[in-house]
Structures are given as structure tokens and as C-alpha cells.
Image (cartoon, rainbow, N blue to C red):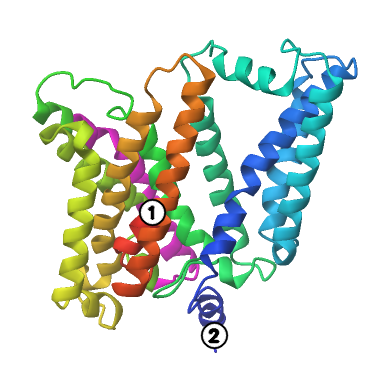
Amino acid sequence: MASAEVKVAFVSNHDGTTLTEVSLGSLLAPLCFLSRGLFLIVFHLGKGLLPFSWGSHLLLDFTALIMPLVLSCTALSDILHFVIMGIAVVDFVVLYLVYKNGKHPYQGSFPNTIDRFVQSRVESNLVPFVTVFRVLVNVKTSISILAVDFSVFPRRYAKTEMYGTGVMDFGVGAYVMANALVCPEARGKDIQGSKISHVFKQLISVWPLVLLGFVRLASVKSSGYHEHVTEYGVHWNFFFTLAIVRVVASALLALFPVNSSWLLALLIGGTYQVVLETTGLKSFLIHNNERTGFLQANREGIFSVVGYIVIYMAGVQVGRYLMQSRNLVKDWIRVIRNLLLTSFGLFFTLYVCQRRIEPVSRRMANLSFCIWT
């Protein structure tokens, strides 16, 4: 077997891992961020000098935020659940000790402290955890893309061939969601000028993505880098998907109320799944080996755009909800509660979809994939 064929085989024909492992792995990043914050609090209580120099901050961020994510995808992947439980226990103990021994403005019994805390005001209208989420998605995506070609990266984390839930499958959906959370529509920005001119501006604004798509296409073809054709197709790549999703979503949100983007996501996702089930599209996407003509050569990339549009529209709705002005801590606690309840509801829906309709497929970006993301 030629070297290129060996490399393609190395990243092909994978079935992914369990939903539990992917979900558990998603807890690592916020735990690391909490650990970083607790370290700064303990350092300050110990009479340490803050703020750090830029070099010290860089070292702290790399050690607390980047290295754990790298290790979770490589050397520690087989014991990741123990690592996460260990970090969670340490964070809980440190948090308890800081509360018990530290000087804080909420003196009194624990219930009174909690009550005063939830009634306290939030001084900023910014939503920093959205920025943190987007940063961590980009970091985890970069790590996975660089590591997937090496044997230290677990094969179960790689993108699946047909059906399954790999970490990298979740990553592409999360990347689209992260973009949708902060798009102009999610931030409540009104359309300037006519709707046609707005869509045209969005068409122009995606030129960097289109350029990156062509640069990647040219570099892959000219360098002889191995290609996993069933991922997006012969000429297609994720940059083209991102560009088209942005333009189509902008057109839809210009035609329909932004507050109904969740309904559009539901209608598009449901219709797409019905088409997959009742026509020959599913067979065309996963069983047809011909690559003649542009459509056949890039069928996975072209048709999966529909699923990513569904994810983007749902992300706009979530972004609209998160970007609302809230002045009290208890308001943000209510947001967290609602997001958790929604997540549990979606997991139940995903369970039903996988049992009754179809398993998760990133290759088709089917309804189960959209719900999972």
C-alpha cells in the first residue's frame, strides 16, 4: 500500500466514541478555567502581587488552560474521567477553604451568604463566558487538527466515517455554534439599509473564508497531502461550508423574524431529515462511490451545509437569549438553569432520534447530529 493510502486509512473508517465520553470531555475546559481563577484567588490571599507580568500570565494560561486540553487528547485520554473527577474534587476543596478561611464581604451563615450573593449586581453588560467558550472551541479544534495525524491521538476521537460521535465531529458543530452566538443578529444589531443590500454585504464579508478555502484546496492538491475524500468531498472543505452557512443564514434572518430562528432551525432540520428518509439522497451520500461531476465529487460537503445552517440558526436563538441585559447574579443563575434543562431535553430527544430515526452522522449532518451539537 502506498504511503498516501496508509495515511488516508489512518484517519478513515472510524466509529467514534460514546456520547458520555464526549460530554465528559467537554467538562474539562470549564474546570480548567475555574482552577485558573481559584489559583489567582489563593495567590492573592497569600499576599501575592497581582496583576502578573505578561510573561507570567502567558505561562499560567498555557499551563492551566492549554496543556490540560492537549493531554486530554493524547497521553491522558484513557484516564480522562479520573483526571476530570480529580480536578473537580480539588476545585471544590479549594473553593470551600477559600470561603471558610478567606476574608469576603458576605459575613454570616452560609444561607445568608448565598442569598446576598445571588442578590448582588453584575457590573458589566458583557458576557465573558461566551468569549471563553469561543476561545476554548478554537483551541480544542486547533489541537485536534494538529494531533489527528499522529498515533498518540485516539482514533475514537477522530471524525467518523458514516455514523458515530467522535470528538472532532462535535468540534465542527461547536465551531458553527460559536460563530452564531456572536453574529450581528444574535447581538440584536438592526439591518442597515435594504434587506438585499444587507445580504450582499454578508456575501462580500465572507471573502476571507472563500479565500482560505481556495488556499487550502490549492495547498492540499499541490503538496500531495493525504485527503479523506468522504469527509467533505474532492474539492470542498470546511471554509466553504462556513462561508455558505453565513450567507444563507443572513438571507433567512433578513426574511424572517430573528426571534423565530429556533423555529426555522426546527423546520429546516425536520424537512432535511424527511428528505433523507423518503428519497434516494441518503443512499447518494453514503453508498455512491462515483466522483464524476462537481456535485457527485463534493456531495458530502454540499448537502451537509443544510445541517450546519440548522445549527447556526439554533445558535442565533441561543445568542439572542444570552445577550439580553441582566443586572443580578440570580438572573444569570436562572440562565444556567434554563440552559441545563434545555440540554437535558435535547439529550432525551437525541436518544429518541437515534433509536427511532437515525444515529448521529456528521457526514450527512442529519437531524441527530444537529440535536447533539
Q: Quadrant of the N terminus?
A: bottom right
Quarter of the image for residue 286 reads bottom left
Q: Which residue shows up at 68% across the image and 18% down it?
A: 113
Left or right: residue 92 versus residue 257 is: right
First-in-chain label (2 vs 1): 2
Quarter of the image for residue 66 reads top right
In x, y percent, where is residue 132? 55, 33
Q: Which residue shows up at 51% across the image and 22% down it?
A: 330
Q: Measured along the vertical axis of the image, is residue 275 above or below residue 44?
A: below
**Looking at the image, which is closer to me, 211 or 310?**
310
User: Mark 1 highlights which residue?
Assistant: 346
Q: Measured along the vertical axis of the image, is residue 233 above or below residue 186?
A: below
User: Mark 2 highlights which residue?
Assistant: 2
**What's the residue type where badge 2 is placed?**
Ala
Left or right: residue 307 versus residue 113 is: left
Q: Name the residue at the bottom extreme.
A: 1
Local packing at callout 2 (Cα closer than 10 Å; few below 14, some 14-19, many 20+) is few
User: In the drawing, what numbered circle is on residue 197?
Assistant: none
Q: Which residue shows up at 14% across the image and 75% down it?
A: 278
Left or right: residue 357 versus residue 224 is: left
Element on which disc 1 rests? helix
**Is residue 219 inside the magenta stretch?**
yes
Q: From this viewpoint, is residue 125 visible?
A: yes
Q: Which residue shows up at 47% across the image and 57% down it?
A: 170
In x, y percent, where is residue 54? 74, 22
Mark 2 or 1: the one toward you = 1
* Start-end of magenta stretch: 200-229
**Looking at the image, which is closer to me, 231 or 61?**
61
Element on which disc 2 rests? loop
Q: Measured along the vertical axis of the image, is residue 345 above or below residue 256?
A: below
In x, y percent, where is residue 205? 28, 33
**What's the residue type where badge 1 is placed?**
Leu
